[in-house]
Amino acid sequence: MTRLYNDPAAFADEALEGFAAAHRRWVRPVPGGVVRATAKTPGQVAVVIGGGSGHYPAFSGLVGQGLAHGAAVGNVFASPSAQQIRNVARAAESGGGVLLLYGNYAGDVLHFGQAAERLTADGVPARTFAVTDDLSSAAADEAHKRRGIAGDLPVFKAASAAAEQGRTLDEVADVAAYANARTRSFGIAFSGCTLPGADHPLFSVPEDRMAVGLGIHGEPGIGEAAVPTADEAAELLVSALLKELPDGVTAPAGQRAAVVLNGLGSVKYEELFVVYRRVDRLLAEAGVQTVDPEVGELVTSFDMAGISLTLTWLDDTLEPLWTAPADTPAYRKGDVPAAALVTEEPVYEAERDAEPYRASEESRRAAATALDALRLLKETVDTHADELGRIDAVAGDGDHGIGMQRGSGAAYVAAREACESGAGARTLLTTAGDAWADKAGGTSGALWGIILRALADALGDTEQPTPATVAHGVRQASDGVRRAGGAEVGDKTMVDVLVPFADTLGQQVAGGAGLVPAWAAAADAAEQAARATADLLPRMGRARPHAEKSLGTPDAGAHSLALIVRAVHGALTPRP
Amino acid sequence: MTRLYNDPAAFADEALEGFAAAHRRWVRPVPGGVVRATAKTPGQVAVVIGGGSGHYPAFSGLVGQGLAHGAAVGNVFASPSAQQIRNVARAAESGGGVLLLYGNYAGDVLHFGQAAERLTADGVPARTFAVTDDLSSAAADEAHKRRGIAGDLPVFKAASAAAEQGRTLDEVADVAAYANARTRSFGIAFSGCTLPGADHPLFSVPEDRMAVGLGIHGEPGIGEAAVPTADEAAELLVSALLKELPDGVTAPAGQRAAVVLNGLGSVKYEELFVVYRRVDRLLAEAGVQTVDPEVGELVTSFDMAGISLTLTWLDDTLEPLWTAPADTPAYRKGDVPAAALVTEEPVYEAERDAEPYRASEESRRAAATALDALRLLKETVDTHADELGRIDAVAGDGDHGIGMQRGSGAAYVAAREACESGAGARTLLTTAGDAWADKAGGTSGALWGIILRALADALGDTEQPTPATVAHGVRQASDGVRRAGGAEVGDKTMVDVLVPFADTLGQQVAGGAGLVPAWAAAADAAEQAARATADLLPRMGRARPHAEKSLGTPDAGAHSLALIVRAVHGALTPRP
């Protein structure tokens, strides 16, 4: 139960502000997150970690000497935007390039990937790596699809220690991948977390039951069992981790391992210690020597009641990186000499990619139409926000309505300003797309940013848009979303609606139809496709671990897209 | 809600064991608690802190270089026994004497005081100091009666840093007193904690309300108000602390202060940061410069939902002690060079004070009677344990039944062993009294240890006990309990029963009555006095902050004493 907040919508920002105020010796705030307050080492690779808020001490609490150089944090459980990540990385980097590290969630993969592209375009070498330590989220033969949970810590730690040693960007990225390959986690949960302002938890487990396998966004896990004793919990977690050893480790006996017994939020330290008492014995019985065990809250999920156990199988490469000193607000080990603090202002750039305005009269008229469409889009999202949240909550984390509202609202405001300053269609839609992605975060934020950018590029700032250019833009948007999200038709995502919408629009226009009737026909096809997603099982994303729950309910992203294309139709009547 | 445990009765011991296993680089376990694992500095004063379990990181998590040398931890929310404290102190001390530091609670004051006496008898100079930082637990003119809450940390820190500087025992004790005099705390709570194995919290607050002023044993506070916003909570706490400045501080402006925003257990770090954001601004507006603020869980109350704010007003004496480096499992700051670990076995002594057995035949018969009495005592406590817990829970923390069971059970076992090895009455009762205090902890454990020791000294190991010697022993017990506990008749404690019981027994015996009828008459007086406590308001102890609740209910300690003297009567019929 989260009780202490002001405006729930401002919770993540205010928490970050208070965190920075309490830890001025370690971090300084920059737009989008925090970077080290200590002086930089020229030429050192900057390790920038990040993800949504609500996982403290991940991610901002792990910034400091020996660990991350910066952390980009989004809204509660929502990925930071590419622009936020870029700001943090620009402020953190010191000439050695940037490694972006995050857990393997669709929204984070999208935004950190886009940020890496923009950083490279800025002339800052950047690589990305997504942590995949959670055994319960995919089988061993699909390990690359696994979520990142408390295994974040040893992977971040290894990569950061390698950066402190002065290794190159490629070497540091390789260390991250190697540490991840030797890291496994498994967890259990007793109850879900309740977000600020919410009056019920994201999920609940019967009082005497536990969910086996869990994510850090309130995902309820893949199985259910009776609440165990502390010893039984330890036995469950250890046995799960000893079952799947990494390549090159044939048996636990004789191995050395970093151990993280992580509390998800409302399990008390005393309880963790009672569990660890048994974990320590079981590992000793298995012949595993523990190295610098960590028992506490390291990657949380608000006030979720649950624990996870992480093992990183050490070798001569990883052990010195795990035991290396670190000094951050939430994680300190060894002997870190005090370092000078940075005094000058944060160095970062928040410039947009928009081109200077040189819009034609025709394109300004098209921009006015686009603005009108964005207004209708925003209004229909506002109208259906609660419904979208309910649908998303069936198998996801229920934030689709909030995210779409945040994004479409920001997009409309940005577009209106662009329109007032005489922007053409391309500039207006680019500005709107960036605003959407920045403010909404999350997967849908990234994908809608891509959609608006694709339309923008198709319409340009000079030409008079034609039905063909609009259809082409929609086709480009459809291709872009499939590329970025990795989803195909049938995966129960917005792609199930976007593709038939683009196809129908293209066929109608090719057949000589005007934009208005063509769009209407495409909107019909979109609605039909959205309804059809109710019969599908999700094949990727957060919903996957409890796919069956979502049968009978359409995909939230598909449903919102269908509502939007219908609403936007009203803006397309050509103007004199 | 505490879910992860094995046997609830073993929770505290198992948590301590797991804690020590997870932190071998900092601490090593000894009977009764933990001491530093790092090599000692000969001649350095040893700071030994302690109290009940359930307050992690207080107290075991604060042991390490720059902070405590050892921590004695009792059962959940129960003071460690004098013997446990003595063991820890003997293992921690290195020739400079021992300062015992703890929060100001009756049980802790008793046990740490007794431990200091035993240490001095052992030839180890020892002093004690009780922290009294909680504004809400007594008025400024009774500041010495206040409870110790999160102010424990800055006081422990200052004293420990002074010890590290090589100051003498008296100097270190003076630093503790000075730091305490400049430290104030104030807190709020939203819900009470639920102890391992319990199915309901120690207290509850309506969903939309908060308790103003709180202790760290589930005491619900002194007032109630609507749940505030995070900013309102910050304003309440800061204004309370700025209202009562310590001697020598005329105004906040221009002052420097150590700040501790403490989470009681189930308030998330993100919430604490949102509150701290406002605390930081309010203190800045008041002209107070914060020094090394701490925001997090430092002195908890299991899963209690609440926060407290602590200010220590710094000066040239205290600031360097607050900012000095420290390296403990839960509290690390600055640059502490790695120290060698101790390798040899813990050095401590657990010897008893019992004299060698040279009991007379008469005294062995008396010992058999005493054993019989202890059996009846234990049986009646077992029978009424739940009732005693319910009575105690009205205004206290509900552990009286459990504590009495633990103590009387241990006393009976120890007495039986003593009896089998031919002990006289004195040895048997001394052994039983020590076992009671050691196993039960808490105030009642200490007081019952005193009662049995007083009877032991009166009966001796050689003489044939007479009604006069028994009456004398009871009188001595009554005086001893009043001295140790500081309570008088009318304070709603066991003294309300013990005094009239001793008086009646004395008068009857002086009037020539035999022990059996005299004891029966005294037991009648005891029952009457116990009932009468229902009409009294407590004047001291944990029940005090919500005294009115206890009207209409007898005092649990008074009630259990009346039950016991009645039951014991059955053992007194003289044997042939």
Image (cartoon, coloured by chain):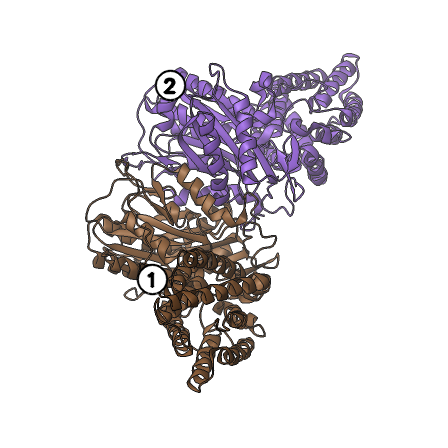
Chain colours: A brown, B purple
Q: Are marks 2 and 1 on the same chain?
A: no
On the picture, is A499 further left or further right than B265?
left
Front of the two marks 2 and 1: 1
- The residues tagged by marks 2 and 1 sit, at their Cα atoms, a distance apart of 53 Å
Asked whether disc 2 touches disc 1, contact meaning CB atoms under 8 Å apart, the reply is: no
Locate residue A197 relative to residue A347 in the image: left or right.
right
- Name, please, the residue furthest toward the front: A576
Taking the image as drawn, is residue A289 in sight? no
- Mark 2: secondary structure: loop
Q: Nearer the viewer, residue B241 or B496?
A: B241
**Mark carried by residue B167:** none
Identify the residue under disc 2.
B317
Q: Tell me which chain the residue with mark 2 is part of.
A: B
Residue A114 numbered mark, or none: 1
Q: In terms of image quadrants, where is residue B466?
A: top right
The image quarter in which residue B165 lies: top left
Residue at 52 percent across and 24 percent down: it is B242
Check the image and report above or below for B441 versus A285: above
Chain of the residue that carries numbered disc 1 in the rendered image? A
Please state which of residues A473 and B527 is positioned toward the viewer in this rendering: A473
Q: Amino acid at mark 2?
A: Thr
Tag 1's secondary structure? helix
Q: Where is residue A344 drawn, in percent x and y?
A: 28, 38
Q: In the figure, B359 relative to A171: above or below?
A: above
List x then y, in percent, for residue B351: 46, 28
